[in-house]
Structures are given as structure tokens and as C-alpha cells.
Amino acid sequence: MKKGEKEANTSQLNILKIIWQKPWLAIAFVLLTILQAGLIIANIIFDARALEALTLGDYENLLKYGILILITGLLLATRTILSNYLIARLRLHTMGILENKIGARMLTISSQVYNSLNSGTIVSRVNMSPAELFNGIKNILSTTSQLLVALFTIIYMMFFHYILALMVLFTVVVAYLFRVIINKYDKKNYRKMNDSYDKMYGRAIETARGYKDIKCLNLDETINKDLEGQIKEYTKQSRYFDNWYMVANTIFRIIYAILLAGLVYLGIVLYEQYYLSYFALIYLLNNYKQLDLIVWVLQQIFRIGSYSMVQHKRINQLFRDDMMPREVFGQTHLDKFSGEIEFKNIDFVYEKVDLEKKLTDDIDKGKKQKKKKQKDKDENTNIDETPPHKVLDNFSLKINTGEKVAFVGRSGCGKSTLVSMLSRSTIPQSGEIYFDNVPMSELDKESIRGNVTVVNQFPYVYYLSVRDNLKLAKADATDEELMNACEKANLDKFIAELPYGLDTVLGENGVKLSGGQKQRLAIARAFLRNTQVLVFDESTSSLDNFSQKKVQESIDGIKGKTVIIVAHRLSTIINCDRIVFIKNGKVEAQGKFKELMKNCPDFAELYTVRR
């Protein structure tokens, strides 16, 4: 026994830190942004001076400023090419790290999360949120130069006259406050649109995966109607989002146009009263729209920033243990189990948690919402809730090394939950499981999953060849080992009939295989892994009688390993060393087949019904 390294705590992603891992790219982009701002500012001044020279007939200065305008234009074009190159490099770097981190995190999220959420909720955070987040940051950085230009233009304008300065300041403040109000509701509507997209996307994935059942059960119209409903909801939220922004922006533009008109009128009055120079008037008339630009830039920064914050939160929810908890393992390492297992005082209840709502509330949370939550909590304090059903209730059982044990009971008695606990996919609320007298909670992931193989009722087959699907269990397996495992799983003859044998690609989730063939492939993978503990959870339920017999003979022939079987076909467990009958989350009776038939009426009744 040896101690493994302590597992690092998962921290939230910080995209700015990821970008800063390539500091020269980030610094170069910032410098080019500042350069762009400087060149545009110079261009604005040169434009005003050129117009002044043209009006006064000063052709020498007109030529000089015309050449300067041409030079700044060429420099701006060169800057654009370099900036596009840098942003492309930065995107490849940032997106690569983001997607790798998200992919790795997905594999550590607990099974309860996947069981509680629509698949679209997780998948959209993987394939959509990172791109939108990066694009948002890129757009904010890109508009920074415009903000600098607008700020310089306005500040320069404010030095012309203090009354003009006050009017400029008043216009910007009003525009800013209006944008703050719009942004508050804009963010909420954007979040709602994203939530409806998650549901629509998840339903589309389910439709694609379940197309066989849809066709066989003639559910085309029903599923299509349901999918149309999800699409309509997404369209409705998108339209509401767009319409809200259009109306709010229109009102803002009308108010802002009135303010700008007042500013221009004030400038003309000041010029007529000799408070402004001719150059100052030209500069004002030529650049008063920079006020519009600064408000537009602020508007873009607010809008894109709020969207980026939503996407940032959505991504970071994947990395937060209070939102999507990860699997937790210990630090103790065991190279190999002997196979002794003990369940001790295990309690388990499926918790009532609306994870979708929890994720939504987290994005929307604020002071007002917290107060509302507290109010709702106070109001609901006296509501009597029915306690959840206990799946396992103080369950205790010891399995000896090399023993073949069957778990039997009616549906919902806790058999599959126990099996799920053996791979630590499910964690008991209280009690402990021991492997070789070591608490499972203290063992690292490799100790548990490197020594325990679980074959589920509905195994997943990857879009790979038969060979590659089998080699997932043992990467260095020889063809002889592969075929030996397939023979034990009664899959060898089927493989021989395939057009390319082991190299035949099976399609997504084994679309070319029957349910029984998928199960036999999964059983072959289990034989290849050859771990000390083998668990078969209804893994032969789809097999025909002949295949069932062949596979059962292979399982019965396993020596020196601990084998646990969950089966509804009770005829398949007759030869087990011990049968454990589970009722209401507890061990009702245990013993050999004949003993239970004689001493356990519930088992005898179940055998009679299922025979």
C-alpha cells in the first residue's frame, strides 16, 4: 500500500490568465490597439486642419495634411493586418486550453449531475460558451481603441469653452445611465434565451439518438411536435430579446439625437458670439458624432461584457463543486485487490435537487434575488414535505474473495445503486464500503476503477471499429487476446461475418449492433480487463438463450475472482455461491438457490413469476 499524491482542488477558470500565458501576443495586441487609437486621433486633427486650410485657401498646408492623412491611412491598414494575425494566434491558444480544460472537467463531474441535467445544458457549455466568451473579449478589446479616440475627441472639445464642456459631460452621463438600465434587463433576457437554447439543443440530441424508437413506435408526429415546441420557445425568447433591445435602443437614440442637436446648436451660438474659433467650430461640426461613438462603444462594452459574463458563469459552473460537483476520491493506493468487499451500514436517498433551476438562479443572483430567496424560505418553513424514499437503509453485507454473489430483488430495491457504488459513481450518504478492509472513501481513483469492472445493462459503443472498441479495455491487447475475449462473450462468430472483421466500424453508439451484440461486446471488454472484481448488472438481459448459455458458462468458469451478478433471469444465478435477496433497501435473506427457495417466500414467488 502506498500513498498517492493529494488531488488538487478544482479552481474556476480565468480566461484572462489563459490569454496571459502568451504575454507577447497579448502585449502586442494591446500596443497595436493603442497605436490604432493614436493614428485615428491624428487623422481626426489632420482632417480638421486640412478642411481649415482648404477654406482659407492655404494650399501648402492642405498638401502637407493630405500627405499626413495618407500616411496614417497606410499605417492603419498595416496595423489591421498585424492585429488580425495576432488575434488568430491568440484564439487558437485560448480556445485550445479552454476546450481541453472543459473536456477534462467533464470526465470528473459526478454521475448525479449527468442524471439531473438535460444533455444540452452541459454540451452547449462545451461547444458554444467558450467561443462566445472569447469573441466577447476580442470585441471588447477591439472597441477599446474607438473608446480612446472618442475620449480624446471629447476631452479636446471640452477645452473650447466651459459651457460646451458642461453640455458634453451632461450628454455622456445621461447616455451612460440609460445604458446601465438597459443592460440590467438585457442580461436577464440573454440568459433566458441561452436556457431555451440548452433545452432545444438537448431535445435535438435526444431525437437523433433515439431515432430507432421514434420510428418503431410511430412517434414521428409526437416527437416532432415536442421539438417544434422547444424551437418555438427558443425563437420566442430570441425574438423577445431582439425586440426588447430594438425598442430600448430606439428610445435611447431619440433622446440622444435631441441631446446632440442641442450640442451642435450651442456650438454655433458660441461661434456667433466669438467664444469659439473657426477651427473649433469645424472640429465640433466634424466630430460631434464622436459623442455618439463613445456612447456606442460604451453600449457595446456593456452589452458584450454582460453576455461574456453570462458565458463565463456558464463555463465556470462546470468547474464549481457547489454547482456541478466532481467525483471525490481519497489518496491511498492499492495496486491490486484480493477481492474482499464489505458494505457496512449503507444509507442512500436520491436527493430532490432541481439542478437546472439552481444553475439559472446562480447566473441571475443578486442582492434582490437573495432577499427574495430568504423570503421564500421563510414562507415555506412550515410546509410539510414528504420525506424521500430510502433506496438503501442500513444495508450491510460482506463478500469474500473469489465468491460469486447475485443481488436479487424487485425493481427499485437498490440493486443497481449498490453496483454503482462499487465504481464510486454513486456515494452513500452514510456508511462505508471496504475493499480489503480499506475504506473506499480513502482509496484513489486508480485503485477503485483499476480493480473493478462494471458491465451495465445498456453499454455505450463508440463510433470506432470493433478492434478499437475492445482496445478501450486493454490498449496493448493482441488479436489473439481480443478473439479469446470475444469467444468467451460468444461474439467471435458475429465478428467473422462482418465485412472487415475486427476493423468494421460500428457507428455511433453501435448503431449497427443489436442490443444483445452490444452487451456481448461490453462483456468481452470486461474479460479483456481481467480485473479482480467483475460486476454484471443485467448485462445479459438482451441475449438470446443460446448466447446466454455460452456467456453464462464463461462467467461460471471464472476462478479466483470476485463476481457480482444482478439479474432478472433468476435461472442464470442458480450456480452462484450465494444469492442475496434485497427488500426495502436491506438484506432480506441470503444463501444458495435451494435454501432461498425453501426459506424465503418472496424469492420463491419472484422465481416462479420470472421463470
Image (spheres, grey):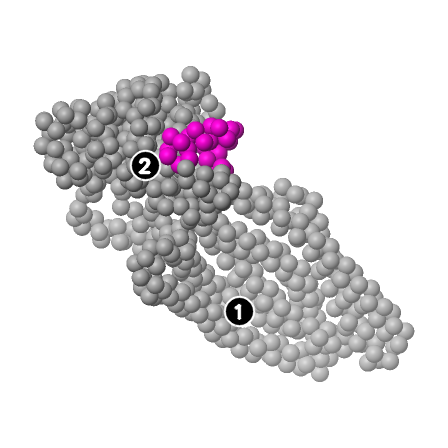
Q: Position of residue 448 (x, y in %)?
A: 39, 27
Q: Position of residue 111 (x, y in %)?
A: 36, 40
Is residue 489 covered in magenta?
yes
* Residue annotated with mark 1: 174
Q: Is residue 29 above or below residue 302?
A: above
Q: Main secondary structure of the magenta part?
A: helix
Which quadrant would residue 109 be assigned to in this image?
A: top left
Q: Is residue 109 visible?
A: no
Q: Is residue 135 visible?
A: yes
Could you classify mark 2 by the number of other residues whose Cα lies within 10 Å: few (under 14), some (14-19), or many (20 or more)?
some
Residue at horizontal 44%, vertical 17%?
Answer: 2
Residue situated furthest top in the rendering: 1
Is residue 184 covered in magenta?
no
Q: Amino acid at mark 2?
A: Ser
**Near-viewer residue (428 or 544):** 544
Could you classify mark 1 by the number of other residues whose Cα lies within 10 Å: few (under 14), some (14-19), or many (20 or more)?
some
* Boundaries of the magenta span: 467-492
Residue 547 is tagged as: 2
Q: Position of residue 161 (x, y in %)?
A: 68, 71
